[in-house]
Image (spheres, grey):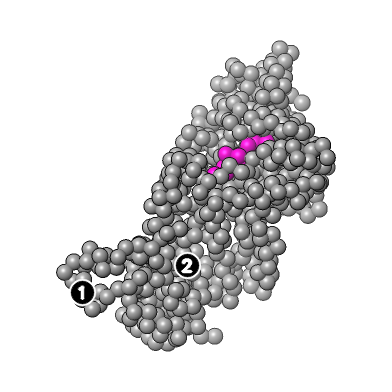
Amino acid sequence: MSKPRVAIFDFACCEGCQLQIVNLEEELLNLIDVVDVVEWREAMSEQSHEYDIAIIEGSITREEDAKRLEIIRSRAKILIALGACATMGGVNKLKNNFDLNEVKECVYGDDASMPHLDTAMTKGVDEVVEVDAMIHGCPIDRKEFTYIIRSLLMGKKPEIPEWPVCVECKAKGNPCLWEYDQVCLGPVIRAGCDARCPSNGFRCFGCRGYVDNPNINAAKDVIDKYGLTVEDLKEKMILFGSTKGPTNE
Amino acid sequence: MTVKKITKADFTDLIEKVIASQKVYAPQAKGDKYDFAPLTSAGDMKLDYDVTLQPPKKYFIPPVETLLTFEVGGGYQSQFDEEKFVLLGVHPYDMVAINQIDKLFSDGHFDNHYMNRRTNATIIALDVVNASKNVFASEIGTATVKQGYDLLLTDIGDAYIAEAATEKGAALLAGANAADATDDDLAKKQKVQSDNELSLSKHLLKCPASDLPKLLEKAYDHPVWEEQAETCFACGSCNQVCPTCYCFNVQDDVNWDMKTGERKRAWDGCMLDGFTKCAPDHEFRKNRADRFRHRLFRKGKYVPYKLGGEIACVGCGRCVGACLPDIANPVNVYNRLFDDLGNG
């Protein structure tokens, strides 16, 4: 059986998730033993239009990017969103909370009107095309990446946690950061990171996105208990939790 | 059965000697809290701890463990932990929890992975010195413990009274500089235990714990489940810190050769979304309220049925502190049910 052909593409992002794949180091040899990587701008010069699996990194911010993504989708049997920018728009979605022209001028100054900077509302990959698998996180977790790839190659559905970060955090015996005045998003954010930030004393920033079924009532209760306001909580959630338009809920 | 009196300094010396030959896990400081961790110096053990973040269950049911290695379409090889170890400083309520899981993992299906670790362990139990802020072991009858340990320590101020309950415990104690306990020492030990039987009660249960299975029989459709679950994150914190929760999930992962792999078992929790998901993606306990009820029915009715009436909440109070929206406290829920249904 010939090896599946894999292509890795980047859109609006810092390319740090691809870097995590490069950082697999010797494990990278295992990866290319089981797949043929035919395009991967960050690591090789070759390009190809023929691939079975497309891995998409980055968010979609321009009309031309959406078109490029649609073409990739039409060529790939399986499309994987890689990292927070791809799975939910990521940090880039912050701009959806502001006037787009203002944002553009703030970032690009005099160049703001150049045609290639004509950006619209930020979208996650699944807001543009159908996505078959999501690899969450900012950046992605290398172990989870390799597990998902192996599962897909075995024809198995990878098990991605539906439960929040607290599960992994408590299993590690961490004290709750809320008790130490940190507004940790762990209770509503998807696990799978092994609670890396809270285990190192930093609140969960929410880079893996919300669980499928977050409890807003519980969140309201907890912010009351700790004498915070909805605004305080929103301020923490906005980094990775911005929505398609301005973040209102 | 040997009962000795050993000074605290001599006990520290004994543990220092034990560390040289065996792995020892003991409660140690973790920030301003405590947790069980590998002991590298006897001076680091904190035997006056109130409660640990995680119960010592993790040394018998690790959060993740490899059950076996396999070859796709071929055979498999079970994997076992063979290392002997000493688990030091187990409070009575946690010892009761271990005793319960011993029964559950050996009756019917004998779980070799678990029982192997149990056989490899020497458990030194310890009567509570300082009550934690949420402990309610006195309400359940788990403030003291009579069995399961190899050695039981009771702090009587200037010394420990050490009671060896097994040969393993006696052998361990034989290495210590210790005197036979006098009647006066035993009276002091008895005093500590009878005090604990009353004082580890920061939350008061309105009915005897043994009445809970009967109370719950009437409570399946009570509104309390919906009300409490309204603010439940379904984060499973209550499950994850519980000494008697033992549910697990099993998953396979293949190696890069795509031919060999590992089967792993990891903690699961009945409060979590997806806990009851089965083929084909059917989830039979999808509502949070149903899962909230299930957890308290497990502790107060279902598991007690397997244990001959013993309540499967040991009153450690960890879930009370771990629950951000403050809804996990079993005593509050059981009391509410007692108020509404107790005399009916």
Q: Nearer the viewer, residue A36 or B336?
A: B336
Image spot of residue A222 (x, y percent): 51, 45
Pointer 2 or 1: first along the chain: 1
Chain letter of disc 1 in the image: A
Residue beneath label 2, please? Answer: A135
Residue beneath label 1, please? Answer: A113
Q: Secondary structure at mark 2?
A: strand
Instruction: Work out which residue is located at the far top of the displayed protein and give it.
Output: B184
Task: Measure how far apart labels 2 and 1 are at the Cα level.
Answer: 34 Å
Q: What residue lies at 79% left-to-right and 38% top-to-bottom?
A: B342
Q: Nearer the viewer, mark 2 or mark 1?
A: 1
Q: Secondary structure at mark 1?
A: helix
Amino acid tagged 1? Ser
Q: Quadrant of the N terminus of chain B?
A: top right
Q: Give the residues drawn in magenta, as a range.
A: B315-324
Which image quarter: residue B153? Answer: top right
Image spot of residue B320 (x, y percent): 60, 39
Image spot of residue A86 (x, y percent): 41, 70
Find out whether residue A235 is within the magenta segment: no
Q: Mark 2: give few (<14), some (14-19) or many (20+) Cα within 10 Å.
A: many
Q: What residue lies at 39% left-to-right and 57% top-to-bottom?
A: A238
Chain letter of disc 2 in the image: A
